[in-house]
Image: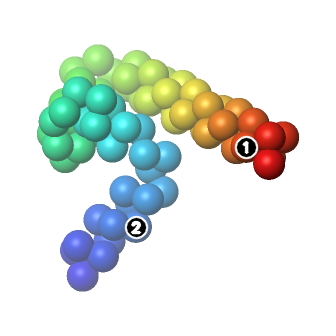
Amino acid sequence: MIKHLRDILERSAFGVCDYLGAKMRVPSATVRLYFIYVSCIALASPIIVYLFLAFWLNIKQYIRNSKRIIWS
């Protein structure tokens, strides 16, 4: 039950922590924990950074998909 809930939350969280974890070669769970700790200490400013990164990743994916459609 908890694993199923965790999978749903990970899919709906834009994949930012997974992306950062893959780039830094650390588990995404570790990135999530540090994000939570920093959010508590810095009073929600990391949430703004997280949303910016999520927006950036979505735009990046959109550009990649549009280039594939043009060249297909």
Q: Residues within 10 Å of mark 2 (few under 14, many from 20)?
A: few
Q: CA distance from mark 1 to mark 2?
A: 29 Å
Q: Residue at x 62, y 39 (%)?
A: 61
In percent of width and height, residue 19 lies at 37, 37
Q: Which residue is mark 1?
A: 68
Q: Which residue is mark 2?
A: 8
In percent of width and height, residue 17 lies at 33, 39
The residue most toward the right is 70
Q: In terms of secondary structure, where does tag 2 sit?
A: helix
The N terminus: image quadrant: bottom left
CB contact under 8 Å: marks 1 and 2: no
Point out the frontmost of discs 1 and 2.
Answer: 1
- Quadrant in which residue 66 is drawn: top right
Q: Residue at x 33, y 43 (%)?
A: 18
Q: In terms of secondary structure, where does tag 1 sit?
A: helix
The disc labelled 1 sits on which kind of residue?
Arg
Q: Is 47 drawn above or below residue 2 in the view shown?
A: above
> Is any atom of residue 61 visible in this view?
yes
In percent of width and height, residue 22 lies at 28, 37
Taking the image as shown, residue 32 lies to the left or right of residue 47, namely: left
Q: Residue at x 29, y 65 (%)?
A: 6
The disc labelled 2 sits on which kind of residue?
Ile
In percent of width and height, residue 14 lies at 49, 46
